[in-house]
Amino acid sequence: MKTILYTQYGSPEVLQMADLPKPAPRDNEVLVKILATTVTIGDCRMRSFTVPPEQWLFARLYLGLFRPRRQILGMELAGDIEMVGEKVTRFKPGDAIFASTFDAGWGGYGEYKCFPENGTLAPKPTNLDYGESAASVGGGGTALRCLRQSNLQPGQKVLVCGASGAVGTNAVQLAHNLFGCEVTGVCSAANLDLVKSLGAAHVLDYTRQDFTRQGILYDVVFDAVAKFPAAQARQALKPSGVYLNVHRDARPTAGQTRIQELLELKDLLEAGYFKPVVDRVYPFDQIVEAHRYVEQGHKKGNVVITL
C-alpha cells in the first residue's frame, strides 16, 4: 500500500512516499480503506517537533528521542471497511466510517489501516462526504469537550479567539446552534465574513481591535488556538466567567468514551448543529504542499487529503 512516512524531524520535505505491505486484520480488528484524511497543526508539530517548551520532555519520550517512533502521521480519517476479523460483530465490509487515530498510534497517511473493533471509529455521517467526515473528528470533538467544561447556558455571551481555525469554526457553530449562546468571534480581517456566516453575532479583527477594550464582559472566553495570554483573556470575563484554553481543557468528558463522543458528533452533524469548514483539498501525492500551507498559519478550518 502507498503511505507517507517521516523518518526524521524537520520541514515538510521529510515526508516521503513509500510502499508498505497491506495490513491484515486480526480476529478482533477491521481493515479500513482510507479515502480521506487531514493535515492538522498537530501533524505539523509532530513532524517538525515544534512543541511548547513545557511539553518538550514528554513529547520527546512519546514521539521519539532522536527520530520518530511512529512514522505515519494522520490523526483523523474516513473510509470504508474492507475486511473484518472473525470475531468482529460491530462492523461489516462496505460500512462507511469516520475515525480518530489518537488511540491507534496515528496512521491516517496511508491507503489502509487496521483498528480494533472497539477502536475510535463510528458510522460516517450520512450528510457529509468522506473529506468533511474526516475533518469533523478532531476539531469537532475538541470544540465540544472544551465548551462543555464551562456548563454553558442559553443566552450567555461567549468569545471565541481563533474563531476561523479548525477548532474555532466548530466552537462558534456549537456555541450558537447547540448551546444557544451569543457568540463573538475573534479572527483576522480576511475571515470576518466566514465567522459571521457560522453564527457569530459579532466579529472582531484581532489585528485592529482588542477584545478587552470593547466594554463587554463575557461568560466564557475560549482561546481555540492557545495564542492569547491567559491574563489578557481573563480581563474580558465576568466575575463568575470561565476561561477555556484548547491546550488545557480538551480533556474527555467524565464518563464518556471516545467512541461515545464520536457517535455524538455523528448525531450533531446529521442534525445540522455544526459542519466542518474545509479550506483546501489536496490529493495524497501533494501532502508536502498541504503541510507547507498549514504551517503558514492562515488556514480557514480544515485542510483535507483525498486518497
Image (spheres, helix red, strand yellow):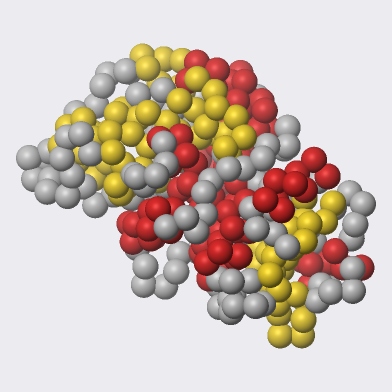
Q: Is residue 46 visible?
A: no
Q: Nearer the viewer, residue 182 or 75?
A: 182
What residue is at 65 percent from the left and 58 percent from the top? 199
Quarter of the picture holding the C terminus: top left
Residue 245 in view (yes/no): yes
x 52%, y 67%: residue: 178
Nearest to the observer: residue 97 or residue 73: 97
Q: Image quadrant of residue 245?
A: bottom right
Residue 306's x, y, as percent?
A: 45, 25
Q: Quadrant of the N terminus?
A: top left
Closer-to-camera residue (43/300): 300
Asked which quadrant contains residue 87, the reply is: top left
Above or below for 193 versus 7 = below
The residue that appears at 67% across and 40% down in the rendered structure is: 300
Q: Position of residue 170 (x, y in %)?
A: 58, 54
Q: Is residue 78 above or below residue 155?
A: above
- Which residue is pictured at 26% across the width and 21% down the height? 22
Q: Please identify the quarter of the rendering in which residue 159 is found.
A: bottom right
Q: How many marks?
A: 0
Spot occupied by residue 113 in the image (x, y as percentages of width and height): 31, 32
Residue that extends furthest to the bottom in the rendered view of this protein? 240
Q: Residue furthest left?
A: 86
Is 265 on the left or on the right of 164, as rendered?
A: left
**On screen, residue 46 above or below 172:** above
Query: Percent x, y for residue 54?
Result: 67, 55
